[in-house]
Amino acid sequence: MRSRIPDRLCSEAVQLALAAAEDVAGPGRVGEHLGVEVDGDRVVTHLFACREDAYTGWRWAVTVARAPRAKLVTVDEVVLVPGPDALLAPQWVPWSERLRPGDLGVGDLLPTKEDDERLEPGFTEVDVRTAHEPLGLGAAAVAHELGLGRARVLSPLGRDLAAERWEEHFGVRTPMAQAAPAHCVSCGFLVRIGGPLGQAFGVCANEYAPADGHMVSLGFGCGGHSEAAVMPAVPPAAEPVVDDYDVEPVRVHHEGGSVDDTEPAEELGHS
C-alpha cells in the first residue's frame, strides 16, 4: 500500500527542486514554494508558484525520488501544471459538434460519418432504370420516393430530428401560430411534400409570409393565410351611355351686350 507520509529526504530537497524548475523556466520565473504532494514510496512532488503572466494560477511541479536505502535524491521530471484557480482554455469540442446552421459556405464540403445515425442504407443494388421501364413514370415516382438509386436515405431518427427542428421554428406552439387566424393545412399557399414527413409538414409559398420557402408544420399559421382576410373584388366601372338618336331641343337666351338684343331668341335642336 502506498504511504501517504512524505519521505523526509525527498521533502527536504526543496533547493534541488527549485534549481530544476529554474533550469526549465528561467531565472526569476519560479515563485515561492507551495507545498509537497506524495506520489509514492520515496517519491514526492514539490510545487512552486509560476510568475509567468500568461499562466495565472499555474504551478511548477518538480518530482523527486530516491532509491531504497539511498540518501541521494534525484529529479524525475519538471512540468507546468494548472492549479485550482488556473486560467484554462475551454474544453475542446469536435468540429462536428461545433457546426451551426448557416456555417456551410460556398465551396465548403460537409462530410457525413459512415455510421451517421440520421441515415440508413438505400436500395442502390436495384437497377432503377430497369425497374422503371415496364411500369412507366408512376413506378419511377414510387421508386424515387423509396430511395431507389441513393446510397443512403433518412433513417427514422433523421426524420424525427428534422421534424423537431422544423417544429421549433415554424410549429404550432410558436407565438406566430398561436395568434394566426387559421392553420397552414387549409392555406392555399401551402405546397405539399411526399413521404412520411409530408403527413405533418409542407413548404410555404407566400412571398409575403415570414415562412416563405421554409418547411412549416401543418399546424403553423400566420396572418398571410390565403383565406384569412379575402378582399372583395372591385366591381368594374359602368360604361358611359351616349344616346345618339334622340334630339332634345334647348332654348338659348342671349345675355345683354353679347349679341343684338333686338334679335329673337334662337331655338337649338331643330334641323
Image (cartoon, grey):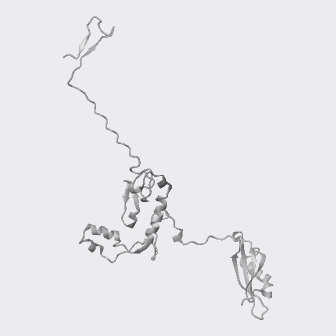
Q: Is residue 249 left or right of residue 34?
A: left
Left or right: 24, with 205 as reference point:
right
Quarter of the picture holding the C terminus: top left
Residue sitting at the far top = 262
Q: Residue 232: x percent and y percent?
A: 36, 42
> Would residue 23 be seen by someone viewing this image from the given angle?
no
Q: Is residue 234 visible?
A: yes
78 versus 91 height, above or below: below
* Foreground residue among 198 and 75: 198
Residue 184 image point, x, y percent: 41, 56
Would you identify the image quadrant in which residue 13 lies?
bottom right
Report the front residue among 80 and 151: 151
Q: Residue at x 23, y 19 (%)?
A: 248
Quarter residue 138 falls in? bottom left
Nearest to the observer: residue 199 or residue 207: 199
Residue that appears at 37% across and 62% down: 193
